[in-house]
Amino acid sequence: MVKIFGEEEMKVNELSKRTGIHLETIRYYEKQGVLPEPKRQANGYRSYDEESVTQLIFIKNCRRLGFSLEDIKQLNALKFHTANHYYADKLVLKQLTLVEEKISQLQDIKVFLQSIAIKGKHSEDECKAIAGLQAKIKKTV
């Protein structure tokens, strides 16, 4: 790390180590506008500070919660605007609805897989699991 104007500055490698986010992902977030473009040193290298670490951890946490990059961009923009807390709440509620739908779909998948899982003896000429999967395919085609 280098000190510039009294602030600790770091290169992308250090930022990657500190946040656990791959270098290419950091650059991708910059290109997508999710992470602000960093300052540049005289030699052209990107220069990051503690705020960059904080922003990347925020992005990482949002991604773990399933938020899209577009939603994260909007949440980032709303973070410091108290008048827009209502909109941030709407984004969170939208994500909650998506998670509930995903849970429902996964529960349906679990029930189906349990229904075709090996139970007892197989007949020699038919595998219940494969027959169940084939029946499911026929229903969806």
Image (cartoon, grey):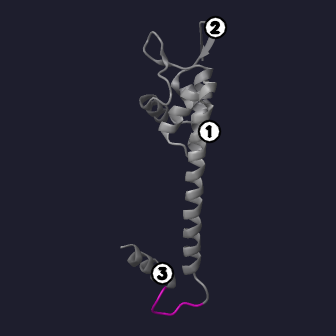
Instruction: Give the residue type that dot 1 points to.
Output: Asp
Residue at 43 percent across and 81 percent down: it is: 135
**Place of residue 58 in the rendered image (x, y in percent of width and height, measured from the top left):** 61, 33
Q: Are marks 2 and 1 in contact (CB under 8 Å)?
A: no
Q: Along the horizontal axis of the image, is 79 left or right of 46?
A: right
Inter-mark Cα distance, 3 to 2: 66 Å
Q: Along the horizontal axis of the image, is 107 left or right of 71?
A: right
- Residue 132: which numbered mark, if any? 3
> Relative to the observer, which residue lies in front, 10 or 74?
74
First to last magenta residue range:
121-127
Farthest top residue in view = 5
**Place of residue 89 in the rendered image (x, y in percent of width and height, measured from the top left):** 62, 38
125 falls in the magenta region: yes
Residue at 54 percent across and 69 percent down: it is: 109
Inter-mark Cα distance, 2 to 1: 37 Å
Instruction: Give the residue type that dot 3 points to.
Output: Gly
Which of the two labelled residues, at mark 1 and mark 3, occupies the earlier sequence position?
A: 1
**Place of residue 48 in the rendered image (x, y in percent of width and height, measured from the top left):** 55, 20
Q: Secondary structure at mark 2?
A: loop
Residue at 58 percent across and 40 percent down: it is: 90
In this figure, which residue is indicated by the disc labeled 2?
6
Farthest left residue in view = 141
- Residue 103: which numbered mark, if any? none
97 falls in the magenta region: no
- Disc 2 versus disc 1: nearer the observer: 1
